[in-house]
Amino acid sequence: MLTNEWYTKNEILKLYPISPSTYKQRIKSIDPTHSKFITSKSGSPTRLIHHSVLDDLFRKRRRLSKNEHNQTIKWVRNHYWSYFGDVVPGSSNVDDLKNKMRFIFNELKKLQMEKNQLTLFYAIEKNTEDKYYHAHFLIDCAKDMLVAKDIEDKLELICDPNSYKEGRIYVKEYDLKFDKGGSIYNSKEKRYFYEVLG
């Protein structure tokens, strides 16, 4: 979440998965009322950009390439997602859960009309009550490709369904009024493993 009113180039590069050259390209179109210069400690001018235009300028971008793994968390936090949730299989270790999430991705892909309509990010975290693991996930898909029930049905292939006593599957439509809150929570950096599929 943005907390400052004005941001420097370095602060922007820490928040958004863009390169310095992309930053330079995108600020060419900025309205002068959303940009100002201050004198830095070294005496040279430092450009500041107003927080209100940051997402419009820097949030959208193509998918990550394989050599941009270090940008994954920033990309996840700035991507527009369709669904989020978590799944808690009965007794999964990290490797088992990786395989299960990749299986789920392949199952969900069967529901797409055209190729490349689906992106799945998942992050594995240790359960608090036992020695096993669960996964948080975010899904981006073409409009009307999936409903939450489709996702829940596929998750039941790797996990017991929810019961009166226990909820092991949670899926919800991503509400954009909460901005990046859900993606920040699902991509907490203290996860054991995370991966983007698609």
Image (spheres, rainbow, N blue to C red):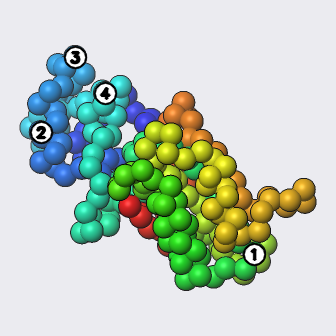
Of callouts 4 and 3, the N-terminal one: 3
Q: Residue at x 32, y 66 (%)?
A: 69
Q: Look at label 3 and name its amino acid.
A: Thr
| Numbered mark located on residue 53 in the image | 4
Q: What whole-number distance in Å separates the C-alpha atoms at marks 1 and 3?
A: 55 Å
Q: Which residue is mark 1?
A: 90
Q: What whole-number distance in Å separates the C-alpha atoms at marks 1 and 4?
A: 45 Å
Q: Which residue is mark 3?
A: 33
- 2 lies left or right of 30: right
Vertical relation: 140 (above or below) 132: above
Of callouts 2 and 1, the N-terminal one: 2
Q: Are marks 2 and 1 in contact (CB under 8 Å)?
A: no
Quadrant in the picture for the C terminus: bottom left
Depth-wise, is mark 2 or mark 3 nearer the camera? 2
Of callouts 1 and 3, the N-terminal one: 3
Label 1: how many Cα within 10 Å (few below 14, some 14–19, many 20+): few
Q: Look at label 2 and name its amino acid.
A: Gln
Vertical relation: 80 (above or below) 35: below
Of callouts 4 and 2, the N-terminal one: 2
Label 2: how many Cα within 10 Å (few below 14, some 14–19, many 20+): few
Q: Position of residue 116 (x, y in %)?
A: 35, 55
